[in-house]
Amino acid sequence: MPKIEIYTTMLCPYCHAAKRLLTSKQQTFTEIDVTADRAGRQQMVSRADGRKTVPQIFINELHIGGCDELMALERAGKLDALLTG
């Protein structure tokens, strides 16, 4: 199983969509809710090369980006390779 980390906020529809996609692929992930976590958000921004939007997704320490990038990987047929590689 790959190590998947997702930085999220409680009310973000893109966060929910990304989690739904990963769950549909029977993947487990660590969710870091940065809704009211200033230190967690700063850690996210640092790891995501300055990106401040959520979600920010990491698979095996590789920064995937946000929900749009995750969905693009799925459409291109490249997500499964990341999840099994």
Image: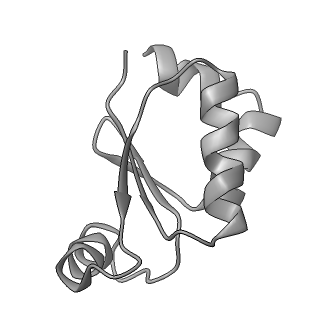
Vertical side of 10 occupied by 29: above or below: above
Quarter occupied by the N terminus: top left
Residue 79 in the image: state x and y as whole percent.
Answer: 62, 30
Vertical side of 9 occupied by 20: above or below: above
Residue 50 in the image: state x and y as whole percent.
Answer: 35, 83
Looking at the picture, tell me which residue is in the foreground, 81 or 1. 1
Quarter occupied by the C terminus: top left
Task: Write down the quadrant of residue 47 in the picture.
Answer: bottom left
Identify the residue at image location x=69%, y=36%: 21
Q: How is the image coloured?
A: one colour
Vertical side of 61 occupied by 48: above or below: below
Task: Write down the quadrant of residue 28 in the picture.
Answer: top left
Identify the residue at image location x=34%, y=82%: 36
In the displayed structure image, the side of residue 83 where residue 16 appears, left or right: right
- Check the image and name the residue furthest to the right: 75
Identify the residue at image location x=64%, y=71%: 12
Identify the residue at image location x=64%, y=48%: 18
In the displayed structure image, the side of residue 19 where residue 64 appears, left or right: left
